[in-house]
Image: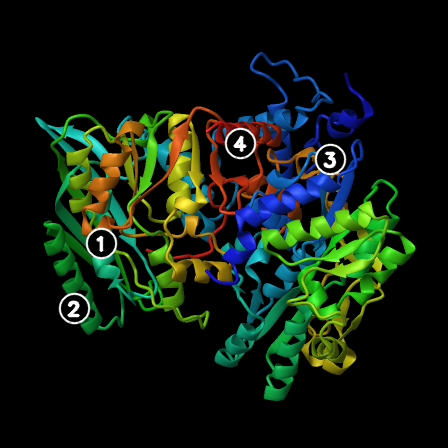
Amino acid sequence: MRFVDEFRDADKAHALAAKIAALCEPGRQYKLMEVCGGHTHTIYKHGLEDYLPESITLVHGPGCPVCVIPMGRVDDAIHLASQPDVIMTSFGDMMRVPGSGGSFFDANAEGTNIRMVYSPLDSLKIATQNPDKRVVFMAIGFETTAPSTAMTMLRAAAQGLENFSVFCNHVTIIPAIKAILDSPDLRLDGFIGPGHVSTVIGCRPYEFIARDYGKPVVVAGFEPLDILQSIYMLMVQLSEGRSEVENQYSRVVPWDGNPVALKAIGETMELRPYFEWRGLGFISHSALGVREKYAAMDAERLFQVPGVRVADPKACQCGEVLKGVLKPWECKVFGTACTPETPIGTCMVSPEGACAAYYNFGRMNRNRVAEANRGARAEVTRA
Amino acid sequence: MTSRGSGRLDHDHQLGQDQPGWIGQALREHDQLEVDAAGRRRLPLAESADREQQVLDRIDRARRRKPRVREERITMSHGSGGKATHTLIEAIFLDAFRNPLLEPLEDAAQLRVGGSRIALTTDSYVVSPLFFPGGDIGDLAVNGTVNDLSVAGATPLYLSAGFILEEGFPVADLNRVTESMRAAAAAAGVHVVTGDTKVVQKGKADGCYINTAGIGLIERDGSLGVARAQPGDAILVSGPIGDHGITIMLARGELDIEADICSDTAPLNGLVAGLLDAVPGVRAMRDATRGGVATILNEIAKAAGVGVLVSEDDIPVRAEVRGASELLGIDPMYVACEGRLVAVVPGEDSGPALAALRAHPLGEQAAVIGHVRAEQPGIVQLKTAFGGTRIVDLLVGDPLPRIC
């Protein structure tokens, strides 16, 4: 398949892997964080770690939109969906995220009408088809999905739709990265920068990471070769003692981002003073709410939202996993009490969540896989 | 032995003590995993290179626990064919009806009546939309049951048909459906010999649901079953996977994606007969419906206590199915087929088995996709096209409800 297979070429991967291995200083350990959950998913789905030397560890970052939604917001959403005549729409990933009383799936079994949509625009279709219902879109995601929410609001306004509103949970990536950089328990060597977020915000917002914290950043695409090449670019910077922002994903990411998308966000949304992130706590200026001008489309203004903060179960270590302090399998309840089937923590829900990716794709002994691969290569050499 | 690092993971043993609800219950069960058969608490995980392995072992213990439905109500996940469906079947139905004929949980039960060996199966059809490119609910209802009998090694003979119709359902549509059923039955050489009709008020069903049951005669010696898989066996698939599921998804018209693709619904009895003639030692066959090929591979690994290794490069998938799956973020390995089977044969028979499948029009693109091995029992591993390794687990959740 064109535009996909080229980026999954095993021969090119072997060549890159050799170049990466050659750049590793003997005895030095490298910790590189992929900020974005989409990258985590790719890494596990394609078994990319097979290509990395033991001295390079990939640390999974906070960029999983579903993972950072705290339990209280899920409860709020279910409360909204339980109001008379409400149809709630949401991305599929949200359906299984547990609130304190269950997930959207459980709520539907109890009688709410929460529907999965692929695009927020589908919510407008539903609103038009059901004029006697109130359609609430549960908006989640980083700057990647915020523009599509914004465009949907602008279109709803243009159509004069009066039965559509947004329960806004959009968050911004930079404060989360800053929280990680300031966290004392983690020493990182560099960042694989989020690709899709950067199509909107561009590469400039990461410059402080390179300048103030001295860590290289390479904005990366989502195919496995994209990620492997980004690791190579980070290793080149580290070997030359440089820390700069580089753009591996230039076929999609403009250096200055997408001004039209940024304008649409700015028109409809504004920064909240603070917002709770799952496991990371309250972070100031880290999320977007609906602007006063669009109050008629703001579910938080239209409905009574309880807004009760629900503490995570004590056993849940999503926060440490999101910050990269713990590997998924190092969480106390990983794979036993918390599984993709009955997730306690959000990291176990989304396909972009580090725990779900490890459980679904990576739940095997990597040391033994490495041994088996060495064995297979030796056999090929002998043949 | 307990350094600070491992202490962080394991110092508080009674995690579930003061936690209410299902989370507390899950945590208390987690605590139980730390107690061995003799009632002794397991030692904290050692700070060693193989700590990850110890976690994997603990997960393995958790997965072998008696399945239990945690939800208070049925959710759409329980119908997905994935993990929740397995839990529902084992925790509720198998628990209630347990007997040696049901226990293997094969596509059809294999029983002895008088001097004859019979296969018996049943299946209900709730697909939406009722009509789709390549078929409709009628031929699906016949082929699905014919296939469940065929992969049990039986010659399908007689079918029953039960209809649940919604008030207001067009008679013209019912005629289309029954005509498809007639044609499908004729093609498969089976007869619909008994039936039932119920009508429910408008809104209490969605047009038309069909249940079919079928019996077939097992004439060959030996029995088939995924529990018979052995290290060294080869695993084959009879053609490109995922056509049916993707066709249904696109036919719903919600995604605004168009692709030139049809359902693969077809009767597999001819293909199966050819395979069994060529390779009498076939260990097991399954038709890859809900949950797709990935689910069957997991059933093999679990039932036989073996490892399964398949290669992504060898799994046939049409470009249209791959393209749609890429766009939708779905893995074709989990997408339903309605005319494809997975077969396990002894390794030395893989050549003749492949030739026999390819000799039939429904098996022209058959392929050997992997093999059974002793390592990593219970785990399905995939060598990715990219050259990496990952596991393939049972599906959780339901990306495609009401596919058949």
Same chain for marks 3 and 4? Answer: yes
Using a 10 Å C-alpha cutoff, classify the residue at mark 3 as few (fewer than 14 neighbours), some (14 to 19) or many (20 or more). Answer: some
For image coordinates 88% across by 52% down, the residue present is: A214
Instruction: Establish if B35 lies above or below B118.
Output: above
Q: Name the residue under label 2.
A: B175
Chain of residue at mark 2: B
Label pair 2/4, CB-CB below 8 angstroms: no
Q: Name the residue under label 3.
A: A55
- Please, which residue is most extreme toward the top here? B38
Chain of residue at mark 4: A
Instruction: Give the secondary structure at mark 3.
Output: loop
Same chain for marks 4 and 1? Answer: no
In the displayed structure image, the side of residue B76 where residue A226 appears, left or right:
right
In which quadrant of the rendered view does residue A69 lie? bottom right
Q: Name the residue under label 1.
A: B266
Same chain for marks 1 and 2? Answer: yes
Closer to us: A348 or A377? A377
Using a 10 Å C-alpha cutoff, classify the residue at mark 2 as few (fewer than 14 neighbours), some (14 to 19) or many (20 or more). Answer: few
Label pair 3/4, CB-CB below 8 angstroms: no
Closer to us: B257 or A98? B257
- Marks 1 and 3, how far apart at CA: 52 Å
For image coordinates 18% across by 68% down, the residue present is: B176
Name the quarter where the C terminus of chain B is drawn.
Answer: bottom left
In the picture, the disc for residue A145 is none
Using a 10 Å C-alpha cutoff, classify the residue at mark 1 as few (fewer than 14 neighbours), some (14 to 19) or many (20 or more). Answer: many
For image coordinates 62% across by 19% down, the residue present is: B35
